[in-house]
Amino acid sequence: MIKKIFMGLVSVTTLTTACVASTNLDKELNEITGTTPTVESVEETPTEELVKVEKTWTCPTCTESEQIVLQKLQERTKIQDRNALATIMGNIKQESKFFPNICEGGARVSYNKCYSGGYGLIQWTTAGRYDNLGKFCKNYGCDPSSLEGQTRYMINENIFQRQLPYFEGSGMTVSYYMNAAYRWLGWGVHGNRTNYSYDYVHKLVYE
C-alpha cells in the first residue's frame, strides 16, 4: 500500500516537472526569437447584399443612338408603357432617323450651320425652340449638335413636359399616344411615323 502511494507521488511529481519544463522551454524560445504566442482569429465572412434590379424596356436590335434615347426617356421620366415609348421613338425616327446633326433636307451640319428648316432629333423648326436648344446647352454645358445634349433638351423642353402626363399613362394604344406626339411636334407630314412606332412595339423587350 505504501509502495503504491509512493509510486503515485512520483508520477504526479514527474508530470508537474514536465509541465514546468515545457513552460520554461516556451518562455526561453520566446526570449530567443522575440516572439509571443498568437491566437488566430476567426472572422465571419460578410454576406453579399442582394440588389434589386429594376426591369426596363430595351431594344437589342436598335442602333446605339436609339438605345441611348430609349434609356434616357426611362431614366428621366416616368414613362413605362411600351406603346408610349414606341410612339416617341417612332416619331423621332420619322423626324431625323436619330441623327442629331441633321438639318432639314438631309445636310449633316453643326448646330450653328443649319440656316433654314428644322434641325436635330425632332427637327426643331421655330426660332424660339431652335434658339432654346442653344441656350439650354450653354447653361448646362452640353453640345447642341450632340445626341446627349439634344436628348436632355428634348426631355426638358416645356412643350414635351406639357404632354408628358399623357405619355406617362399606361395601357393606351399607339393611336392615343400619337395624339400627344402631334401636340408635342406639330408635324406637317405624317409620313411613316405610325409604321415606325409599331415596329418599335415589336422590337422593345422588357428585361
Image (cartoon, helix red, strand yellow):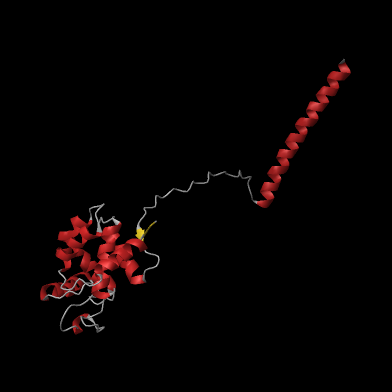
Q: Is residue 76 visible?
A: no
- Based on the displayed image, in which of its 4 quarters is residue 38 positioned? top right
Q: Is residue 57 visible?
A: yes
Q: Is residue 121 above or below residue 32?
A: below
Q: Nearer the viewer, residue 173 or 164?
A: 173
Q: Nearer the viewer, residue 165 or 146?
A: 165
> Percent x, y for residue 48?
47, 48
Point out the image quarter for the C terminus.
bottom left
Q: Is residue 166 above or below residue 114?
A: above
Point out the image quarter for the N terminus.
top right
Q: Which residue is outermost to the top?
A: 1
Residue at x-position 14% and y-position 69%: 186
How many marks the image carries: the answer is 0
- Based on the displayed image, in which of its 4 quarters is residue 165 positioned? bottom left
Residue at x-position 80% and y-position 31%: 14
> Percent x, y for residue 56?
35, 57
Q: Nearer the viewer, residue 60 or 161?
A: 60
> Percent x, y for residue 23?
71, 39
Tell me: 100 left or right of 163: right
Tell me: 104 left or right of 27: left
> Percent x, y for residue 42?
57, 43
Q: Is residue 99 above or below residue 70?
A: below
- Based on the displayed image, in which of its 4 quarters is residue 96 positioned? bottom left
